[in-house]
Structures are given as C-alpha cells and as structure tokens.
C-alpha cells in the first residue's frame, strides 16, 4: 500500500502523542515483544486529522465524523507498522488509496503542488501516468529508448498535456496526442501519427501533418501550413503563403500570400498559385454553380470546356411578352459604345456600353451597375432578328426590282429591234 501524506501526518501525530505521554511507553529492555500491540485511531474526513482512541484517558469511540481504523505494532520496540493494517480485504479504511485496485469516491481526489517548484516524479523511457505540479503538466502513455527524454523537465511545457506513444509537448500550454506527435509551439496542438505543430498557436491533425506557421492549421496526410494564419486541408497540400489556403490534393499556394488553391483528385502535377491573392481551382470534372434551393438554376462549366452553360429552359421561365425588334434596334443604335478600361485594371482595353445606359434603354437585369450576360445576349438576338427581317425585305424588293428591270430590258430590246427594222426599210 502506498503511504500517502495523510498517513505520514497520522504517524507524526502518533509520535507527538507518544512524547506527550498519551500512549503508554513501550518496553525498553530491548527484549522482543511477546505479543503485537494493536493501536486504535480515528480519521477525520476532509480535514486529515488522526487521533488515538481506546487508550488510557482517551475515548473508546470516534467523535462524530471520525472513521475508525487500527494497526498492529511490529516486532521491533517503538516501531509502528502501518503495513500491518487489518481489514484491508474488507476495504474498511477509506482514508487510504489501494495499491492495486480502485476505490470509489464521491468527491474524487486531488494531488496539489506549486508551479515552478519541485522535480519530476521520474524520467526516461517507460510506461506511466505522471502528474508534475511544478510544470502543471500531465503525461500518460509510453516512451521508448529513442524518445526517452521527451518527458524530462527541459522538454515539458508549462501547463502542457501529452498522451500516447512517444509524444512530446514542449511548448507552454501545448497538447500532443497520438503516436510520435510533437507540439513545440506556444499553445500548439498536435493530434495523430507523426503530427508536428511547431508554430505558436498552431494545430496539426492527421498522419504526418506539419503546422510550422504561427496560428496555422494543417489537417490531413502530409499537409503543411508554413505561412502565418494559413490553412492546409487535404492530402499533400501546402499553404506556404501568409493567410493562404490550400485544399484538396496536390495543391500549393506557392508562397503567395492571401491565395486560395484547390486541387482535385487527379494524379497530375501540383496546381499552385502564381501571384498573391489569387483564386486557383483545378476541377477536371467541371464546375456546377446553383443559385436556387431547388438546384434548377445556375451555370455549368463542363469538363474540358472553356464555355459556361447556364440554365435557360422555357420550363424555368414565366411572364412572356413579345419584343419589337425594330424598337430594340433603335435603342441599340442610341446606346453609347466606347473603348474603355476598368480603373482596377489599368492598361487593359475593353469595348462596350455601360450598365446605367443599358438599364435605361431596356429595363433589364437586377440593377444599374451591372449588365447580365443573358440580357445582353437577348438584346443582340432581338437586334439580329430585326436586321434579318430587314435583309429579307430588301431581298424581296430587290427581286421585284429585278423582275421590273428584266421586263424593262425586254421592252427596250423590242424597241431597239423595231427601230433597227424601221431604219432598214428607209434605206
């Protein structure tokens, strides 16, 4: 049985009682005792006080709240043997913890200490549960010889927690769990196999991830987040730029800050960012964007394509009304069309009209600062149809004119022949 502080307190009290004369003096002749001496005492819960009973001038019973127990004096004169406590098989001494068992408790137990003082309970390789008050640190699991120093004082962070096989939590406030995981950054966390969180406030989760950037997160197989405040989520992804994100498979932010890169699960080369604050996606199966809760409207960019397919089925539309193509042509003719550049894209020229004028001319779209491509296409189609009708009308008129011209030519030919005949007769 482990001898706890409360036991030592009781022994000290018994010694004091003996010195004060409350315990009858034992023989001092040096002869061995013929019969062991049984001592009776009481233990006061929560306070820890131990006092004798059933001795001369002492009570035969415990006061209220006291728990009775007894022990037998050993063979040597003046030595009390707490190891000879009776009744242990009945577990009737609740003031003691059992060496190889479990004791039920309503209020639990506490092992206290002072931060910054004391030495580690043990060190080196082995399997153990260890609480070190001097570092306010808890360790549970096993260390092999290669990692024997992982739980030695220089490698234990204040307020840290480590549990598993060969885990190291050397950063203050760090936590390490799993097999061979390391949390060396301040307030860092590592979970899994071979996970490493070396950046302050970093988190590494999974098989062999590394979070080395401050406040970075790496989750997944061989995920790495080296940029500050970066996120790497997936397999073989790297978020190396500050505030960057790499997700999926074989994706890298390539040291470009603020960039976002997604890689699909195709076994091609690494997809990466090429400039800061860039959004890069490799989706060899195509894109599908939906804008309604029924998933009926939106746009697709099919696999291998460079052209968007947007929903435009008649079954999705309502409130139909005819369009006067000539009126559309007239409004198109009145639209200002110029060459221009976006203020945020200097040096790049574009050709087109403006959202405000387009809205005034046709009343289409969701607002006055943007032109819907579907609306622009509709205007172009209406104008093209009007032009086609004009073309057909012109062709019909030209055909009629051709007939008239043919008739005139025939009549002119007759006149020429008559004139030639008259002239020949005059001769």
Image (cartoon, rainbow, N blue to C red):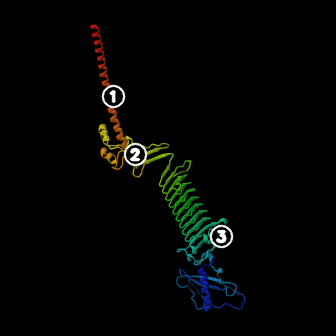
| Pointer 1 or 3: first along the chain | 3
Q: Is residue 410 above or below residue 250?
A: above
- Secondary structure at badge 2 equals strand
Q: Are marks 2 and 3 in contact (CB under 8 Å)?
A: no
> Label 1, on which residue?
395
Q: Position of residue 193 (x, y in %)?
A: 59, 60
Q: Of discs 1 and 3, which sits in the foreground?
A: 1
Q: Which residue is at 52% across, 84% downward?
A: 64
| Pointer 1 or 2: first along the chain | 2
Q: Of discs 2 and 3, which sits in the foreground?
A: 2
How many labels were placed on the picture? 3
- Answer with the quarter of the image where residue 172 lies: bottom right
Left or right: 204 in relation to 146: left
Q: Which mark is residue 124?
A: 3
Q: Are marks 1 and 2 in contact (CB under 8 Å)?
A: no
- Secondary structure at badge 3 equals loop
| Pointer 2 or 3: first along the chain | 3
Q: Which mark is residue 334?
A: none
> Label 2, on which residue?
350
Q: Quadrant of the N terminus?
A: bottom right
Residue 185 appears in the picture as rendered: yes
The 10 Å Cα crowd at callout 1, few under 14, some 14 to 19, many 20 or more, is: few
Left or right: 82 in relation to 419: right
């Amino acid at each position: 049985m482990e001898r706890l502080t409360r036991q030592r307190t009781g022994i000290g009290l018994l010694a004091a009682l003996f010195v004060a004369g409350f315990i009858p003096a034992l023989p001092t002749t040096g002869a061995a005792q013929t019969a062991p001496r049984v001592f009776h005492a009481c233990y006061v819960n929560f306070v820890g006080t131990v006092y004798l009973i059933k001795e001369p001038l002492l009570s035969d019973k415990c006061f209220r709240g006291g728990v009775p127990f007894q022990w037998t004096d050993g063979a040597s004169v003046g030595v009390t043997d707490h190891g000879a406590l009776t009744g242990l098989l009945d577990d009737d001494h609740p003031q003691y913890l059992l060496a190889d068992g479990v004791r039920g408790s309503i209020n639990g137990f506490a092992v206290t200490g002072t931060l910054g003082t004391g030495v580690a309970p043990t060190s080196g390789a082995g399997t153990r549960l260890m609480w070190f008050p001097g570092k306010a640190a808890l360790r549970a699991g096993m260390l092999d010889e290669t990692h024997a120093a992982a739980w030695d004082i220089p490698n234990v962070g204040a307020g840290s927690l480590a549990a598993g096989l060969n885990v190291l939590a050397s950063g203050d406030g760090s936590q390490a769990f799993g097999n061979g995981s390391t949390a060396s950054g301040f307030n860092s966390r590592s979970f899994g196999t071979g996970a490493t969180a070396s950046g302050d406030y970093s988190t590494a989760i999974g098989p062999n991830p590394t979070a080395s950037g401050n406040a970075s997160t790496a989750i997944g197989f061989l995920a790495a987040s080296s940029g500050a405040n970066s996120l790497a989520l997936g397999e073989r992804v790297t978020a190396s730029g500050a505030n960057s994100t790499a997700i999926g498979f074989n994706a890298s932010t390539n040291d470009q800050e603020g960039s976002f890169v997604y890689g699909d699960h195709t076994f091609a080369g690494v997809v990466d960012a090429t400039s800061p604050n860039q959004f890069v996606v490799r989706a060899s199966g195509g894109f599908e964007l939906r804008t309604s809760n029924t998933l009926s409207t939106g746009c697709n960019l099919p696999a291998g394509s460079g052209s968007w397919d947007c929903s435009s089925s008649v079954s999705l539309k309502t409130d139909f009304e005819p369009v006067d193509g000539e009126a559309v042509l007239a409004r198109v003719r009145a639209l200002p069309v110029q060459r221009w550049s976006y203020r945020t894209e200097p040096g790049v020229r574009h050709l087109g009209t403006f959202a405000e004028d387009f809205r005034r001319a046709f009343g289409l779209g969701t607002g006055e600062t943007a032109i819907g491509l579907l609306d622009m296409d509709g205007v172009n189609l209406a104008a093209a149809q009007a032009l086609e009708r004009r073309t057909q009308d012109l062709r019909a008129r030209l055909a009629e004119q051709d007939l008239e011209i043919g008739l005139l030519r025939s009549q002119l030919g007759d006149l020429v022949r008559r004139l030639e005949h008259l002239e020949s007769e005059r001769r």
